[in-house]
Amino acid sequence: MHEINQDLEINTKELVFVLLKRIWISVIAAVLCAVIGTVYATNYITPMYSSRARLYIIGSQNTGMFSSSELSAYATLTKDYVNLIRSRTILEGVVESNDLDIGINQLNSCISVSSPENTRIIDVSVSYPDPLMAKKICDSVCSEVQRKVIERMKSEQITVWDWGNLPAYPSSPNIREYTMYGAAAGFFIPLALFAILYIFDDSLITTENVETRLGVNVIGTIPYSKALSGRRTRSDSKPQDNQKSEKKK
């Protein structure tokens, strides 16, 4: 067990050495991928602007005291309104009132509705490529919900607390995130490839490789000389050249 752990430690050290030797490749790849991520997010992704509004459900009583059953009823009512905001009736009214050239499914994907837990507050958010249109759609959603509740439920329980704001800056894409993700991918992917190549490389290069993988002791080594190898190659080629010259004669 001690020998196995020692071999594993030696292999780990070799792996770290191999990765450190080639880390400059990962650094260059990280810089290039960071630039690619920034250029892609800046030029090839449509900026989206988010406008946020807030609705509030009015209680039937003016006092601030509610029983547990009333609080439970308001919580259920809030969930119902959250689901109704994304209903086909509301979306069709928003498309018609703003003369939008998109369908209700595409409009639905631009709308986000949520409600903080144990509150009668409903937050509506609309993301759209045009900041002014994002605000108009957000306000239209709130107006349409309020109008439909009064029209169909004969109730004025819901009111607009905050109308949609006019966004000054795009909410997406996050250029910094694309740059960071690109840099991380460019740095770690080459390192992972080098590690995989090292793990599956079964070539015997050093005496340590021979002793570790074959389990035999190395008695000695024969040095390699390029000069001697070149002489041997030239000497081997001379008899062939002499034979060719004799054939020509």
Image: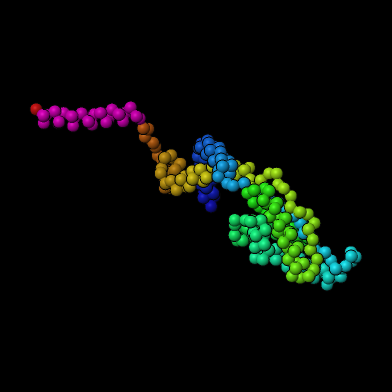
The segment highlighted magenta reads 225-248
Closest to the observer: 208 or 23?
A: 23
Could you tell me residue 120's position as x and y percent?
A: 79, 63
Left or right: 40 as drawn, with respect to 98:
left
Nearest to the observer: residue 247 or residue 75: 75
- Counting from the top left corner in percent of width and height, residue 245 is at 13, 28
Q: Residue at x 72, y 61 (%)?
A: 144
Q: In percent of the image, x 66 and y 45: which residue is there?
A: 170
Task: Give me the residue at 79% from left, 61% from top.
Answer: 159
Q: From the viewer's perspective, is 60 left or right of 5?
A: right
Residue at 16%, 28% in the rendered image: 242
Closer to the camera in the image, 217 or 140? 140
Q: Please say whether residue 30 is visible from this viewpoint.
A: no
Foreground pick, 121 / 15: 121
Main SS class of the magenta portion in the image: helix
Q: In the image, is residue 34 above or below residue 107?
A: above
Residue 107, picture quadrant? bottom right
Q: Residue furthest left?
A: 249
Left of 130 or right of it: where is 185? left
| Residue 20 on image: x %, y % | 53, 38
Horizontal and vertical percent position of residue 115 = 74, 60
Say if the magenta span includes residue 232.
Answer: yes
Does residue 206 show up magenta in the picture?
A: no
